[in-house]
Amino acid sequence: MPPSNPLADEVSHAVFAAVGAAWEAGCPVAGSDPTRRAEIARRAIRRWGSAPRRGVSPAQRVGDLAKGLIAAFEPEARLVGPLARDYAYLAAVIAGVLSGQKDDA
């Protein structure tokens, strides 16, 4: 097993906490289950990190993250409807952590 990366662990914990805070703020897509929150955090960190390689501009990153979360957690992405706003909110909260900004969402 590779050694633990303290910085990666810190980021992961911060994103996990942000997802929990989004749930507490009323975001239904953040999930009440810690396992789901951990999966959201893992997928969000991966998507955020791959954005430059995929050609996503900094201005598009939050929207790209929301699209990635929808694709990962909704069985029929085109039927998401009003939940798209909740995914956009969650993506903005997570982006605030990943970009080093304090969450004001």
Image: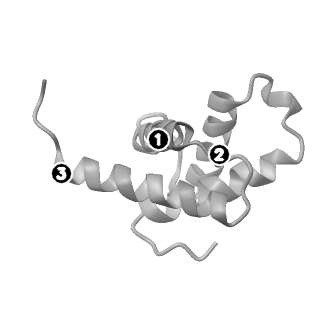
At label 1, which amino acid type do we have?
Answer: Ala
Which amino acid does the dot numbered 3 rest on? Answer: Pro
| Residue placed most toward the observer, 22 or 81 | 22
x 82%, y 46%: residue: 83
Q: In this figure, which residue is indicated by the disc labeled 3?
A: 6
Disc 2: CA contacts within 10 A as few (<14), some (14-19) or many (>=20): some
The answer to whether 23 is drawn above or below residue 30 in the figure is below
Disc 2 residue type (three-letter): Gly
Q: Quadrant of the N terminus?
A: top left
Instruction: Tell me the SS state at disc 3.
Output: helix
Which residue bears the numbered disc 2?
31
Tag 2 secondary structure: loop
Image position, residue 72 (x, y; %): 62, 29
Mark number, residue 38: 1
Looking at this view, name the residue that lies furthest to the left. 3
69 horizontally vs 38: left or right: right
Mark 1 lies on a secondary structure that is helix
Of labels 1 and 2, earlier in sequence is 2
Name which residue lies at 79% across and 53% down. Answer: 85
Tell me where residue 78 sits by quadrant. top right
Counting residues from the N terminus, which is met first, the one under dot 2 or under dot 3? 3
Q: Is residue 55 left or right of residue 80?
A: left
Give whichever of discs 3 and 1 has the lower sequence position: 3
